[in-house]
Image (tube, rainbow, N blue to C red):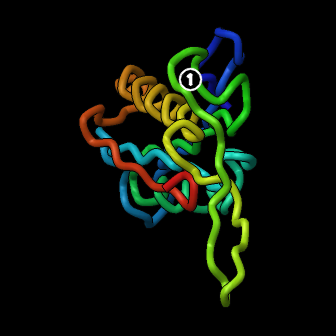
Amino acid sequence: AVGYRTGGKWGAVTLDLYQPVSRDGGPSVPDVKPIVVLMHGGSYVNGDSTSDNMPFTANWYASRGFVAASLNYRPRGAYGLIPAGDYDYTPEFVWHDVNGTATKYGFLPDYELIYPAVRDAKAAVRWLKAHAAELGAAPDFVVAYGSSAGA
């Protein structure tokens, strides 16, 4: 794991890097590789860079010439949901009508709840672009992949 966001009150936030490798009889690795950023799901509550089959997916992309980065990010509630004083926010449950009965579904995942994850994803992309030369990657060719909360 590589720290892409260090220091601060939350400590290090890391990503796992997967680099393409030439194999006998396989395609050659391009000199400049595209970057794919993978974000796991978990309702912004749990999960990590190895969740949702991300290592398999990262290896799949790396085998096709990408530099793949599977991110860890701060889940909901880690070191506060949002910066103090930035929002007036109280979590609300989502209610659904199921056969005429109001059913509580869970927290509505709105912007205030995903704020730390979005900030961390942006920090990871900035880190990958800043280190593109040493990774042999193209800083202007970055794509994102995610599942559920990471999508």
* Quarter in which the N terminus is drawn: top right
* Residue 27 sits in quarter: bottom left
Quickly name the residue at label 1.
4
**Looking at the picture, how far across and down is residue 63, in whole percent?**
48, 58
The residue closer to the viewer here, 133 or 99, is 99
**Looking at the picture, how far across and down is residue 7, in whole percent?**
65, 9
Residue at coordinates 48% horizontally, 53% vertically from top-left? 62
Label 1 residue SS: strand
- Quick one: which residue is furthest to the left in this view? 140
Q: Is residue 138 above or below residue 3?
A: below
**Looking at the picture, how far across and down is residue 93, in whole percent?**
67, 55
* Residue 140 sits in quarter: top left
Asked whether the viewer can see residue 112, the reply is yes
- Quick one: which residue is furthest to the bottom in this view? 99
Q: Residues within 10 Å of mark 1 (few under 14, many from 20)?
A: many
Count the numbered circles shown: 1
Residue at coordinates 39% horizontally, 53% vertically from top-left? 65
Q: Is residue 143 left or right of residue 7?
A: left
**Looking at the picture, how far across and down is residue 129, in whole percent?**
36, 27
Residue at coordinates 42% horizontally, 32% vertically from top-left? 125
* Residue 64 sits in quarter: bottom left
Residue at coordinates 63% horizontally, 60% vertically from top-left? 94
Q: Is residue 2 above or below residue 9?
A: below
Asked whether the viewer can see residue 55, the reply is no
The amino acid type, in three-letter code, at marker 1 is: Tyr
